[in-house]
Image (cartoon, rainbow, N blue to C red):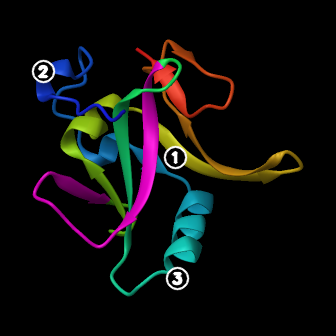
Amino acid sequence: METTLEPSQAPAGAEGATPEDFKVTESAIKQIDKILSTEAAGSLLRLSVEGGGCSGFQYKYEITQELTEEDLQIAGSKLLVDKISLDYLKGSQLDYKADLMGAAFKISNPQATASCGCGSSFAM
């Protein structure tokens, strides 16, 4: 089940987040470039926050070629985050980690009060 977040649901104190409020590491940028190099020309990676997951909110990644008026382009214009999701990501950092346990994007979100073991869902 997919839940759409409304502006009125934005976390307190996060309204008006800007792309500068969300950091993307060089490792994540390189991985985004690598992923998109195998996709159709003009493809972008969309990151969004949705209601759901075991902790209340979850991160969602998808490849898209559609740019909407709600999207903000981040990290060399290859990463899209909609304005509402950006409020939930204010102060966060997207990183890409590869180690013996596996490889994945990781988001360090200081607004999260709890998260699940896999790191893909969080509570505020």
Q: In which quarter of the image is residue 52?
A: top left
Q: Mark 2 points at which residue?
A: 8
Q: Mark 1 points at which residue?
A: 94
CA distance for labels 1 and 3: 19 Å
* x and y percentages locating residue 78 in the rendered image: 38, 69
Q: Which of 7 and 2 is in front in this view?
A: 2
Q: In this view, does 89 lie above or below 74?
A: above
Task: Give me the residue at 54% from left, 82% from top.
Answer: 38
Which of pointers 1 and 3 lies earlier in the amino acid sequence? 3
Which of pointers 2 and 1 lies earlier in the amino acid sequence? 2
Image quadrant where one finds the N terminus: top left
Q: How many labels does the image show?
A: 3
Which three-letter amino acid code belongs to the residue tagged 1?
Answer: Leu
Q: How crowded is mark 3: few (under 14 residues within 10 Å), some or many (20 or more)?
A: few
Q: In this view, does 1 lie above or below 94?
A: above
Residues rendered magenta in the picture: 56-73
Q: How crowded is mark 1: few (under 14 residues within 10 Å), some or many (20 or more)?
A: some
* x and y percentages locating residue 31 in the rendered image: 60, 66
CA distance for labels 3 and 2: 37 Å
CA distance for labels 2 and 1: 25 Å
Q: Name the residue under label 3.
A: 37
Q: Nearer the viewer, residue 18 or 82?
A: 82
Q: Is mark 2 on a helix, strand or loop?
A: helix
Could you tell whether 64 is left or right of 95 in the image? left
Task: Give me the residue at 41% from left, 85% from top.
Answer: 40
Pair 2/1: label in front? 2
Which three-letter amino acid code belongs to the residue tagged 3?
Answer: Ser
Task: Give me the residue at 55% from left, 72% from top.
Answer: 35
